[in-house]
Image (cartoon, rainbow, N blue to C red):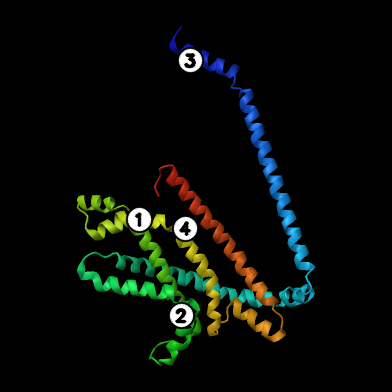
Amino acid sequence: MTVQDEREGGRAAADADPYRPSARRIARERHRRNRTRRAFAVAAASTVATAAVLYALIVDSPGWDRTRQTFFDAHYARISLHPVLVGLWLNLRLLVVCGAIVLVAGLLTALLRTLRGPVFFPVRALATAYVDFFRGLPLIICILLCVFGIPALRLTGVTNNPVLLGAFALCLTYTAYVAEVFRAGIESVHPSQRAAARSLGLSNAQAMRHVVLPQAVRRVVPPLLNDLVSLQKDTGLVSIGGAVDAVYAAQIIASRDFNYTPYVVAGLIFVVITIPMTRFTDWVAARMNRRQSQGGAV
């Protein structure tokens, strides 16, 4: 009998006698399925019970009727939906433009803070002072200072548009936060990576660009996405300077009709936009954690 005949005989035997899981494995898989179904049933029951308790507490409260008329009126929700959506377009544009500016400016600021050598001390000190100041300054105060303080200077060629000035304030504040995220990513790369790049003949700038930054950026993607989620919500603060965004559109209707349902509509729209971004951030973080635990590139 030739080797080929033996192989064909083995394949025929395998086809005639397919693999059958053992009784222990079947029982283990059945137990796992039962446990999953039981956990799902318990979670569903506890969720329904919690929702029922909250509903009873809210609906049976003495001021529920007045609260429902003031904050959850269907009529005012309908008439405010279109103006709020029109104002939301400004918030989305601010998110895209300010997000791009913040990412670039934050990376440059982080690079300035990581420059080596005594000659760059003034640059490092200025970058550190900028980050510390704007991370500590409340965003709403920064917006007020930019929207009302910059036009008061009467500088030639400087705009007094509240949208542009509010966007400038957002960029100032969030650049400081993003710079710290990038700096943490850069410092998390082991010094041996830079030393290996230098030993191969790369300059400090080349080592930073081709070796350190790619690893650092990959590591800080989840916190960067979290900052963008926060930026998306904080774009509504430009309304305090008079920019007609979703929040200010809701404020106009609420002030005219003395009903606060438009604020609820605007808030729910922001939530609907934010939740997918948050879930995407969680997915990216979980994916990177799995790759790191499996020994892949971080």
Left or right placement of residue 245 versus residue 110 in this view: right
Spatial separation of the CA atoms under disc 2 and disc 4: 26 Å
Which quadrant holds residue 26? top right
Q: Is residue 152 visible?
A: yes
Please name the amino acid that badge 4 sits on. Pro
Circle 1 is placed at which residue position?
Answer: 188
Q: What element carries label 2?
A: helix
Q: Is mark 3 on a helix, strand or loop?
A: helix
Circle 4 is placed at which residue position?
Answer: 222
Residue 174 image offset from top left, x and y in percent: 44, 71
Instruction: Give the total number of marks visible in the rendering.
Output: 4
Spatial separation of the CA atoms under disc 1 and disc 4: 15 Å
Instruction: Classify 101 as above or below 160.
Output: above
Q: Mark 3 against mark 1, which lies toward the viewer?
A: 1
Q: Mark 2 against mark 4, which lies toward the viewer?
A: 2
Please name the amino acid that badge 2 sits on. Cys
Please name the amino acid that badge 1 sits on. Ser
Circle 3 is placed at which residue position?
Answer: 7
Q: Nearer the viewer, residue 271 or 86?
A: 271
Left or right placement of residue 83 versus residue 295 in this view: right
Spatial separation of the CA atoms under disc 2 and disc 1: 31 Å
The tag earlier along the polypeptide, 3 or 1, is: 3
Q: Where residue 142 is drawn, which disc sits there?
A: 2
Residue at the location (71% across, 54% down)?
47
Neighbours of disc 2 within 10 Å: few (<14), some (14-19), many (20+) = some
